Image: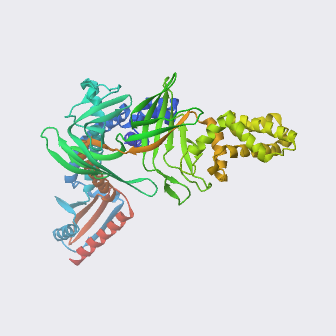
Amino acid sequence: MRFAIALLTVLCIASIIGTVLKQQEPFGNYVNQFGPFWAEAFAKLSLFTVYSAWWFLLILLFLVISTSLCVARNTPQILRDLQNFKEHLRESSFKAFAHNATWGVASQPAIAAGHIQQVFAGMGWKTKVQERADGSLIAAKAGGGHKIGYIAAHSAIVLVCLGGLLDGDLLTRAQMWWGDKVVFTGGGMIADVPASSRLSVTNPAFRANLLVAEGQTAGTAILQQPTGVLLQDLPFSIELKKFIVDFYSTGMPKLFASDIIIHDKATGEKTVARVEVNHPVSYKGVNIFQSSFDDGGSRVKLQSIPITLGGKSIELQGTIGASSALTNGADKMTLEYTALRVLNVETFGKKDLRNVGPSITYKLRDAAGQAREYHNYMLPIKFTDSETAVHLVGVRDDPSTPFRYWRIPSDDKGGLEGFLRLSQAVQSASATQAAIGRYLTKASDPAKPDMRAALQTSSERVMSLFATDGLQGIADFLEKNVPEDQRVKTSEVLIRILNGVLYELAEPQLRDKPDWLNQSVLALSDAKAYPAPMIFQLKDFTQVQASVFQVTKAPGQTIVYTGAVLLIIGVFFMLFVRERRVWVWIKPAGESTDISMAYATNRKTMQSDQEFERLHLRLSQQLEGT
């Protein structure tokens, strides 16, 4: 029993891990989440496929066999005990019971025995009388269902484990072991996957995912495996007519629903249905659950915005999940359209939740296969700490890290053009020299040529440092060339010069917006850390939704539910039903009768003491009344 409880504890812990940790994801996802060492360690322990791990299935199998043997061995004895009144108890044994009593009555033994049996019958106890040469023994019992609880509880463990084996990955593993089925690790179209990686329509148990885009039909589900996939052919195909999603104010989805048509492959029959979360549809023994949703191939239009001098703008059209080739002379890159999000609810305070509009996620992959991921919002966003709305341009080198966002101030027309023209002007030597000349005319006295020359030198140095390394370049220059006690004052002078020249470089309609100019200085400085020569901005899109269905065939489901009901019944009987037995010895004593009584129960409680006292009192009163 202790060993079985230990095994059940291991199963409980493993089930918690299998619930918390996403199962059967691609191994790369686990590497990004846990790192190479721990991902490899967890994989060896099969923690990414807990429910199909050999040790998990072995424990289930052991519990099924051992508990079945235990039930088979003890059930006949339990059933015999249900019929056994243990009426062969000796009179001398009564004193050995914790609850016993002896008294005398004036009635005859036969009359006393009749009244005793009436008392037990009125209380729902079963009785059996054994006549002996020196008296009569009445054996009574109640609560025999306690032992039925033992059978029910242990049978429940067998059924639940058996159902788990049937609905787990055991049957799929068996087909891989003995049916020459192999995991498919390649790419391409579903139709090109060989039969060796496909499971038959008659597969008795499976749990797979099926992605269907709006207006499309699919009838082959995917069983994700750690090293690849298996395909499960379904006896029907699902056509997605409309996907419906509704959101809370926080941006979290509160409703998934799919209006579908089920096409029977054998008969051609069409069945209209709606699948919602927690409201699956069942067809030919296969349950269809609404699992999640995804992009179904939305079409997007991107406009490239060059941030380097001399760059050219291009327009791209693509589909989410596809890619476009880019060429810049000898450099060749691939733009991969990763995701389109139409709704982005962001937090700008405890109660300030705002939808900031659509965003596009894409990857730029070089010829060596290295890729960076970008996430750009379509519309400018206004933060509470700024008067100017900014465009958020995100980038990250690793999927496991959050995006770093470059804030680019929006111009008077809500676009990036004003900032980009300022950026290109900063990079243009001729434009910068002209702006420095205009700044000197306003900031210096023509009558003091020496001061004008010094200011010009300082202006040219500041703009050169800023154009090359941003604000960090100016800070490094101060640290190397200016004494520490003079750095604060000198930095104020240089920043004033920088702002003055940038004011002259900015377009006239933007010069009178101090916050825009301040944001532009920071954005120009941060541009040095942006790894791409251009920004791809989302200009237009046509969204296509897709539903992700989980299709399951679970023959063990009914077995598990039956086991759960039996477990409830068994635990109830074992905890709340007490088996009680009473023996009453009736012995003639001249013209009177001696009565001896013994009481036993499988659990000694305060209720047992009280019940014995009630029985003793009830029998005494009944016999004295005769």
The answer to which image quadrant residue 181 occupies is top left
Q: Residue 203, can we see it? A: yes
> Which of the two residues, 290 or 472, is positioned nearer the viewer here?
472
> Which of the two residues, 524 or 64, is positioned nearer the viewer here?
524
- Residue lying furthest front: 447
**Which x, y percent locates residue 207?**
29, 39
Q: Residue visible at 87% across and 43% down?
A: 448
- Does residue 411 sit above or below 579 in this rendering? above
> Which of the two residues, 436 or 579, is positioned nearer the viewer here?
436
Quadrant of the drawing holding the C terminus: bottom left
- Does residue 84 sit above or below 376 in this rendering? below
The answer to which image quadrant residue 229 occupies is top left
Quadrant of the drawing holding the N terminus: top left
Task: Tell whether 468 sits left or right of 29.
Answer: right
> Which of the two residues, 435 or 407, is positioned nearer the viewer here?
435
Task: Tell whether 39 sits left or right of 94.
Answer: right
**Which x, y percent locates residue 278?**
31, 52
- Does residue 163 sit above or below 588 in this rendering? above
Task: Tell whether 435 sits left or right of 324.
Answer: right
**Which x, y percent locates residue 590?**
21, 70
**Which x, y percent locates residue 459?**
77, 39
- Residue lying furthest top: 330
- Residue lying furthest left: 267
